[in-house]
Image (tube, coloured by chain):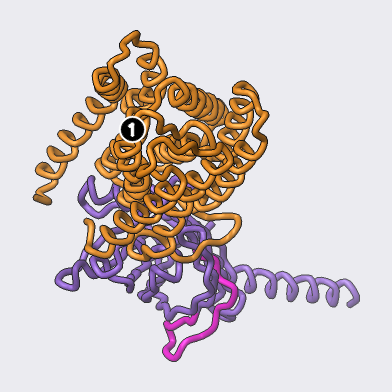
């Protein structure tokens, strides 16, 4: 009787532990399937699009309690790509991103909350660009979860938000290049 | 792309401030008036003050927020000029300082300021040491050349040195650093005007004017190398200017204008070749990128 009780407790604890592990999972950002893109106004006439290639990072996601989730994403400043070599070179100089002194830009979440919809999240965190760190809150969406042909579990998130580059010390060529930068971050994580 | 405010505040303003300081110091209308050594520090303070003034009034070029420690390579320059002004006053006030002692003072100021500007871990130590050593050589060479060559030669050489650096850096992608060098060239132009007016007894050598122009220009050149994409060969071709000025100051020609012309031409030839190559490549890149 006593051994049955002990066994029951052990089984119950195992069940709880495995359940917790199932929901709070670690994911590594898949650089090849994640995108960090931006859009900025040019002479108030057109838009220039660009991206930072090969973002990296780690995600911890708990669907049952999103407050336990964390998002950490980083990209190399010299991985900037606007489709034009001269413009890329200019953007990496001290005129804009100053890639030599600020080799990375990053986001590290400090709070994650449920949004209005089932798939919605409200993520607060520290965004660091050009050596300046600001706390921002963004609305994100959980895109889905699935297994790939290798049997690995993948999960996707996406968010779109706007920042002012002058808030991050980049105010060169104001007027010619807009202050508002629209960022689109699409992340795909592979469960570890 | 330069706007009218950029030209006014980044060009005319520093020129005007430096010109006033140099006119007060040298009084070129009284050609035989002796300028006390201590007063020559005013010329240097005028040069650095002009530079700071252009900085403060040119929001379109530079970031208005200056914090310590500076976050950007170009923001260190603002602190440079303060130290250079102090060094100029020290050099002038300590009137018994011998040439080699002044050389040591200039070398120390150069080394410390350049190290501060490039202290970030992105610059390998060996390259930082080379940059500091080369800057010390440039500053000392300019100083000795200015001692040996009175009149308009060295003001022209140093102003064009800064101007060439401005164009060179702009063609490699950093308009901001290039415009700062342009502000320095505008400041140096004031010394050219006064040197022409005053004539053969004009000299920037005592009081720190030479160190101000040479050090800031050379620091910007190295900033172009470490923070933008200045090619090493173009850096060394341009950096040869002060050294060539020293070498050519030994030309045994006494005729003032012939000597001046030879010093200017021979000192600046490698730099002129470097900037010409860079401009040609920049134009070709622009065409290739369909930006023109």
Q: Is the magenta region chiefly helix, strand or loop?
A: strand
Name the foreground residue: A150 vs A128: A128
Image colour for chain B is orange
Name the foreground residue: A33 vs B195: B195
Q: Is residue A14 visible?
A: yes
Q: Which residues are magenta?
A: A107-122
> Which residue is labeled 1 in the image?
B199
Judged from this view, the residue extending furthest toward the bottom is A116
Which residue corresponds to the image point at 61% horizontal and 46% vertical from the top-left? Answer: B86
Which residue corresponds to the image point at 49% horizontal and 79% vertical from the top-left? Answer: A137
Circle 1 packing at 10 Å, graded few (<14), some (14-19), many (20+), is some
Which x, y percent locates residue B261?
A: 25, 22
Helix, strand or loop at mark 1: loop
Which x, y percent locates residue B198?
A: 35, 37
Locate the N terminus of chain B by quadrant. bottom left
Q: Is residue B231 visible?
A: no
Name the foreground residue: B274 vs A180: B274
Which residue corresponds to the image point at 30% horizontal and 54% vertical from the top-left? Answer: B11
In the rendered image, the vertical position of residue A125 relative to residue A50, given as above or below: below
Give the side of residue A149 with respect to residue B71, left or right.
Answer: left
Write down the quadrant of residue B253 in the picture.
Answer: top left
Q: How many discs appear?
A: 1
Please tell me whether residue A113 belongs to the stretch shown in magenta: yes
Write down the quadrant of residue A2 in the picture.
Answer: bottom right
Q: Which chain is represented by purple in the image?
A: A
Tell me the subunit letter for badge 1. Answer: B
């Amino acid at each position: 009787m006593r051994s049955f009780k002990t066994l029951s407790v052990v089984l119950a604890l195992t069940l709880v532990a495995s359940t917790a592990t199932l929901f709070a999972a670690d994911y590594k950002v898949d650089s090849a399937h994640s995108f960090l893109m931006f859009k900025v106004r040019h002479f108030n006439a057109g838009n220039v699009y660009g991206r930072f290639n090969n973002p990296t990072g780690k995600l911890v996601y708990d669907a049952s309690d999103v407050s336990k989730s964390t998002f950490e994403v980083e990209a190399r400043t010299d991985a900037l790509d606007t489709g034009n070599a001269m413009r890329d070179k200019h953007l990496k100089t001290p005129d804009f991103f100053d890639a030599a002194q600020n080799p990375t830009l990053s986001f590290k979440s400090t709070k994650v909350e449920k949004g209005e919809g089932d798939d919605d999240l409200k993520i607060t965190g520290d965004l660091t660009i050009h050596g300046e760190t600001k706390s921002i809150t963004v609305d994100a969406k959980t895109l889905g979860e699935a297994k790939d042909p290798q049997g690995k579990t993948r999960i996707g998130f996406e968010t779109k938000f706007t920042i002012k580059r002058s808030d991050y010390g980049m105010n060169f060529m104001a007027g010619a290049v807009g202050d508002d930068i629209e960022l689109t971050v699409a992340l795909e994580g592979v469960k570890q | 792309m330069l706007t009218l405010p950029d030209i006014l505040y980044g060009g005319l303003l520093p020129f005007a401030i430096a010109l006033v300081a140099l006119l007060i110091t040298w009084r070129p209308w009284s050609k035989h008036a002796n300028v006390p050594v201590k007063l020559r520090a005013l010329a240097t303070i005028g040069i650095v003050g002009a530079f700071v003034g252009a900085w403060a009034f040119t929001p379109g070029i530079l970031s208005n927020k200056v914090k310590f420690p500076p976050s950007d390579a170009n923001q260190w320059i603002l602190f440079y000029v303060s130290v250079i002004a102090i060094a100029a006053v020290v050099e002038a006030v300590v009137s018994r300082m011998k040439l080699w002692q002044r050389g040591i003072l200039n070398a120390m100021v150069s080394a410390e300021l350049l190290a501060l500007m490039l202290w970030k871990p992105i610059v390998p130590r060996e390259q930082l040491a080379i940059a500091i050593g080369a800057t010390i050589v440039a500053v000392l060479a300019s100083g000795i050349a200015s001692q040996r060559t009175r009149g308009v030669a060295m003001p022209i050489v140093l102003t064009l040195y800064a101007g060439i650096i401005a164009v060179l850096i702009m063609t490699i992608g950093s308009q901001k650093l290039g415009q700062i060098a342009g502000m320095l060239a505008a400041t140096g132009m004031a010394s050219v005007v006064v040197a022409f007016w005053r004539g053969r007894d004009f000299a920037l050598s005592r009081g720190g004017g030479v160190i101000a122009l040479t050090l800031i220009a050379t620091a910007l050149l190295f900033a172009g190398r470490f923070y933008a994409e200045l090619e090493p060969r173009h850096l060394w071709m341009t950096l040869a200017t002060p050294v060539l000025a020293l070498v050519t100051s030994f030309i045994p020609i006494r005729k003032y204008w012939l000597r001046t012309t030879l010093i200017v031409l021979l000192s600046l030839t490698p730099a002129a070749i470097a900037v010409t190559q860079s401009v040609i490549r920049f134009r070709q890149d622009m065409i290739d990128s369909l930006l023109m």
